[in-house]
Image: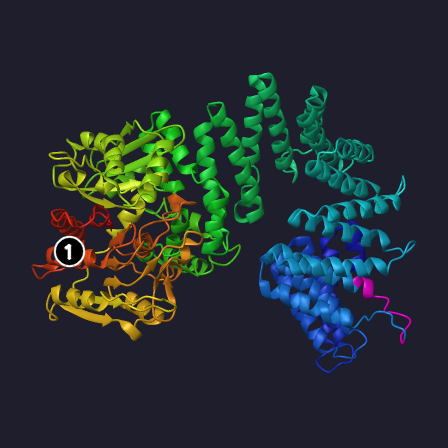
Amino acid sequence: MLRTRFERRGNEKDLDQGIALQTKMLALCPVGHKDRSGALNNLAVQLSARFDYRGNDEDLDQAIALHREALTLRPVGHTYRSMSLNNLANKLSTRFDRKGNDDDLDQAITLDREALALRPVALASRPVGHTGRSGALNNLANRLSTCFKHRGNDEDLNQAIALHREALSLCPIGHTDRFMSLNNLAKQLFTRFQHRGNDEDLDQAITLDREALALCPVGHTNRSTSLNNLANKFSTRFCHRGNDEDLDQAITLHMEALALHPVGHAHRPMSLDNLAIQLFIRFDHRGNNEDLDYAIALGREALALCPVGHTDRSGALNTLAVQLFTRFEYRGNDEDLDQAIALHREALNLCPAANVVPGGLLSRLRTSLLWVDLACRHSHATELEAYSTSMQLLDAYMTTTASVSSRHNIMKDFSSTLAVDAASCALRNGDVCRAVELLEQGRTLIWTQMTRLRTPLDSLQTHGDHAVALMKRFRNLSSLLDKPRANYSETTPRIRKIEGLSRFLLPPLFSDLKDAARDGPIIMLIASKSSCHAIIIPHKQPPASIQLSTNLEKLQTLVVKLQRTGSPAPMKALMELWDDVVRPVVENLGGIARRGSRIWWCPTSVFNFLPLHAAGEYRKDGQFLSQLYISSYTPSLTALIKARRYDRSLSVSFAAIGQNCPAGASFTLDCVEPELELVRSLLPPPSTVSFTKITSVDATKSRALRALQDNAWLHFSCHGIQKYEDPFNSAFLMRDQPLSLLDITQTDLSRHEFTFLCACETAVGDRDTPDEVIHLAAGLQFAGVKSVIGTLWKVNDSTVHRLVEAFYKNFCGDGTMNSKRAARALHRAVQSLARDTEIPLDQRIVFVHIGI
């Protein structure tokens, strides 16, 4: 009775008192009592009701635990087993929707299958089927539909449709549940149409919705819902086939639905929005100004009915914004453009709590990108603000994703030029420092997410017990960040209140980023559709921006030339690279870096695929970059700063890992064993360096990974592959399984000094997401290795042997080891090869240095 009164009046005290009474009742039914299963079930139902009202996860977890125990007390053959199976399945499904745990969904489906089996169909030997079969069919179908949406397995959707068809067959004309069954089947057929595009599914869904609407005559409580369902499918069919009659019918149905939602009705804003969207589509199709003006009028009314705090306000703001912008494009009224952008901005400022909800974040991110598009196309004053907002939201949305691969897919779904376009916008506004900040904030986001989990927190130890407690809390949360929906939005603001940690996990400021140029200037290269720039960042002086004479199209053509010709690095292309990109930079380095000193390239976009270090005039007495400076690369300024963070280890443990015959290979790398012996012979004596060699049958994935973890200095000699379609599966091929980039990213190498990657394609990257810099060499640096040597393309055995010998003689010939020498040692080794004209040009420039 208390629960019934709560459901009618909403008084929370009734709900709490009812739960208290049910708890006492359960205590009076100890284990073995005949009424215990009923008491367990009743308390679970009450706790579920309170969860639905307040959203307290503890109530849901307790309800599930009680339903589990009730089920154990109702074994196979028990009258109420089917009901208990259904109750537990429903609650597990609810928890899956809330937390995304796959086990909950799988268990719910298993329970629903058993419940369905306990509600058999009618047979000749059993003329009367179970009365609850239709409900069990619907439950299992709905769960399989959820599974399809979560995992994308077509078979789950097909099964759901088959189950809904059977349920509908059990609800003939006149059956009270026929309307529900028609709706369920129509919905799933429509989902399959959206997934596969089969016209028959869409036509069937419309037929079913027509019948459902016929079961809801004027005055029926479900008529408006049925009108909307059918209207939405007509609209979809119009978009699919272009039949004007479908669009007109959709508008007519939405108009009737709106009439059923007069002023004051809770669903009026939704009906206004639905009709406005269809009128807007018809305007786009036929160009009738009346449709557009009417749509905007409806949109304004819908927005007025969604005051600040209303759950639908954000959607109403965005819909009206798009329509106003369209009218601006047709009529040129600046007021419409300003209003459209103002509405998008307000939509983004709503519901800051959505920052921890993936769905809310995705909606806000898409809104921000619409704002970017509007502001850019019309040079609106809010353009830079729009870019900044979008990058903040993209970073936040990626935090909610479950895995590295899903983060990579997210980056492929959104513009790969967002960061460089934002930086170009900042440069147009004359703000070079802001351009650098935006580049650093919007690039290498996948790496940022991973390294964020390993943020050094040792400094918190010195700030008292409160700081130590926060450190432990953050570390616990960080361990969960590769699971869906984990977040640390509550803990990080408290850490930022501690002195000296105000920027904890926030995008770095230029005042911090310029420290990357401590040992030499950084040159960031920007290639956007609007312009191409180089930004030179010295340590003590202000940054300088240089507009380059090239453009994005020319650079893309240059990349193709380097890939398509017989030689991967033809002289003509390298001369063009010198003229258009490198020489303007060199001309501005004169007062910043002395000749023979080090410089770091931080390329973006298409620049990532150009061998900048090899640019030159390639003629007698011509200039070459390699004659002027020692080039290194860094994927980001933050990566370089982090690489310098730890002091060098006094002890040197060096592992040489080689594999000449990897699993599944039809070739043998004859140079591997001699190369590892060569490396050993050139290292300082055992009294200084602890040397481990792993090769042949011993070089398995697990042994290589262990050596990678246990040794701060490494040399790989093996076959490397860059997986363009799935770059995190790029790998070193070992005896049994590949040692992948994903394996490396999950390893903390924060105190590692140096790695030489004598393998093909270890510094190539992914062309779909170039600014994520996803390759083996970058992965090692982001994992913590200070200094890495990698390759841009395939290497020849003869070249490798000579370069390795020259490198290690320069690197540690005086008997000491220092990772900061790697770039200069590689530079000298390459210079020594350059004098041998028998070595092809592409092999002389294939190796690059990344890091300190």
Query: Residue 257's spot in the image, x, y percent?
Result: 80, 36
Q: Is residue 407 toward the left or the right of residue 757 in the image?
A: right
Residue at 81%, 61% (x, y): give it: 166
Q: Residue furthest bottom?
A: 32
Amino acid type assigned to the residue bearing label 1 in the image: Phe
SS of the residue at dot 1?
A: helix
Q: What residue is rendered at 21% in x and 36% in y?
A: 538
**Residue placed most toward the observer, 210 or 568:** 568
Is 525 left or right of 313, judged from the image as shown?
Answer: left
Start-end of magenta stretch: 125-135
- Image location (x, y in percent) of residue 71: 71, 74
What secondary structure do most residues of the magenta stretch adopt?
A: loop
Asked whether, in this view, residue 178 is left or right of residue 608, the answer is right
Q: How many numbered callouts?
A: 1
Q: Residue at position x 28%, y 33% from top?
A: 535
The quadrant where residue 744 appears: bottom left
